[in-house]
Image (spheres, rainbow, N blue to C red):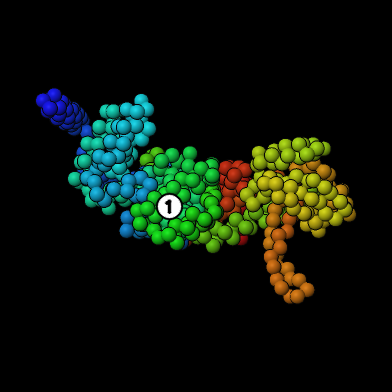
Amino acid sequence: MFRFVRLLSFSAWSLAAMISGAFFLMASFFLYLTPTLPDAEQLKHTQLQTPLRIYSLDSKSIAEFGEKRRKPINIGDAPQNLLNAFIAAEDNRFFEHRGIDIKGLARAATQLVTTGRIQTGGSTITMQVAKNFFLSREKTFIRKFNEIFLAIQIEQSLSKQEILELYLNKIYLGNRAYGVHAAAQVYYGKPIDELNLAQMAMIAGLPKAPSRYNPLANAKRAKIRRNWILDRMLDLEMIDSEQHAEAKSSLITASYHGGSSELYAPYVAEMARREVINRYGSDAYTSGMRVFLTVDSKLQEAASRAVKKGLEDYDKRHGYRGPIKTLDISSEEAIESAISELRSIKTPRQHQAALVLEVSQDSAKLSLKDGQEKTLLREQAEWARKYETVDRRGPAIKSLEDILQTGDVIQVTTSNTETSNEDGETAMAEIIHLSQLPEAQGALISINPDNGAIKALVGGYDFAMSHYNRATQAKRQPGSNFKA
């Protein structure tokens, strides 16, 4: 009995010593690190890096420039299911703790002791805010202690809603998307309030590892992560069983959506970008500037159409110059290799490269770079009389075999037309047209004579093929510029 009492007393004193030691260690780190920590109050006045955006006179978006795609949101504009998805995935006790989650840290410490390495950091959303705004991403004990002490300061300075708003606007979610609004645009091409539950859970799964759980890179792994978050939301009673079942059965609908431009005016956008950078320096790429031009969207669209059509019509009147190249398609493997090569061929906007698989008098079977097979009819290539000289073309074509052969890589465009069947039902049919890159170039500029404001400007046939702005950089003969 006496030995048992002594053992119990020893154990109690040992436990007290361990607790005191841990407290002393934490206090020492606190006194040592606190003077070097940044002031959490800075977060109240933080300015998130947002790109430079260019708009037309009537507020149509033309372009954005900057490494980070971000559009900050107010926490009140975020759907509740989106907030719940992130809380379920990252920190389900977010509204209960004061910056640190003792259970989470204990779990991380246990993993470290049992495995010998750091597997999970036990980080709360507040700790992630501290890391993202003030600290590096290296996994060291000193950084973890800094994270903990900063999280405590942040909780004292900001409300839970303010912390969650900073988190949702700061986090990196892959494909240059920073913050949930940018992620919704990149992966689904729509604002966050139009996402469904499955899509919100998919985005909430990205902070853990944006490349590993990216639906564009690994849809299977991303779906597993999404479904785990949906299970967590059900367990935490954030959603009901019907919502859970519907979301888990949803297909992966993510696809890459580039910059959301409402008006195609790349030459004007580049002029504006250069002017802004000359005036304000490279900070313009991150300070969220919005630049409104004198360009009218309707006039700009009309100018782009006029230049494009004029150059294409002029080029077609001089004849067809032949395929881009001719590839070997004598075997299945050769065909696969040739189709793969299509992906590396650069074509103008709204054009695409196609491989001729078969050709007859009235039609040709084509393969696009994604493997889709299309049919080119002779009437969509009748303009393609052979180019001989700048002043002379060959005879009118009587067969597609006059201009095409198997293995040719050509350029095509598509258009849609309405067709009707014998019953009078209408449907849209896709038509494939033979095309080529015009050799001639052109430019157009429309200026308000009263104040010199540019109303529309086109600097060439296709900005992606040539950034040279012929409206402002080319030397022109004055006789063709001054008209009575």
Question: Is residue 222 visible in this depiction of the protein?
Answer: yes
- Residue at 34% x, 28% y is 114
Q: Which of 266 and 471 is in front in this view?
A: 266
Q: Nearer the viewer, residue 102 or 191?
A: 102
Question: How many numbered circles are shown?
Answer: 1
Is 322 left or right of 128, judged from the image as shown?
Answer: right
| Other-residue count near label 1 (Cα within 10 Å), few / some / many at <14 / 14–19 / ≥20 | many
Q: Where is residue 6 in the image (x, y as percent from the top left)?
A: 12, 25
- Residue at 58% x, 42% y is 468
Q: Where is residue 321 in the image (x, y as percent from the top left)?
A: 78, 44
Question: Is residue 318 visible in this depiction of the protein?
Answer: no
Specify the farthest residue to the front.
1
Q: Indicate whether 133 appears above or below 317.
A: above
- Residue at 52% x, 56% y is 250
Q: Where is residue 408 in the image (x, y as percent from the top left)?
A: 78, 42
What secondary structure is found at the residue carrying circle 1? Answer: helix
Is 53 left or right of 469, judged from the image as shown?
Answer: left
Specify the farthest residue to the bottom.
424
Q: In which quarter of the image is residue 150?
A: top left
Q: Indicate whether 372 appears above or below 132.
A: below
Q: Nearer the viewer, residue 316 or 453?
A: 316
Q: What residue type is labelled 1?
A: Leu
Q: Mark 1 points at which residue?
A: 230
- Residue at 24% x, 43% y is 99
Q: Where is residue 158 in the image (x, y as percent from the top left)?
A: 22, 48
Which quadrant holds the C terminus? bottom right
Which quadrant holds the N terminus? top left
Is 322 left or right of 443, judged from the image as shown?
Answer: right
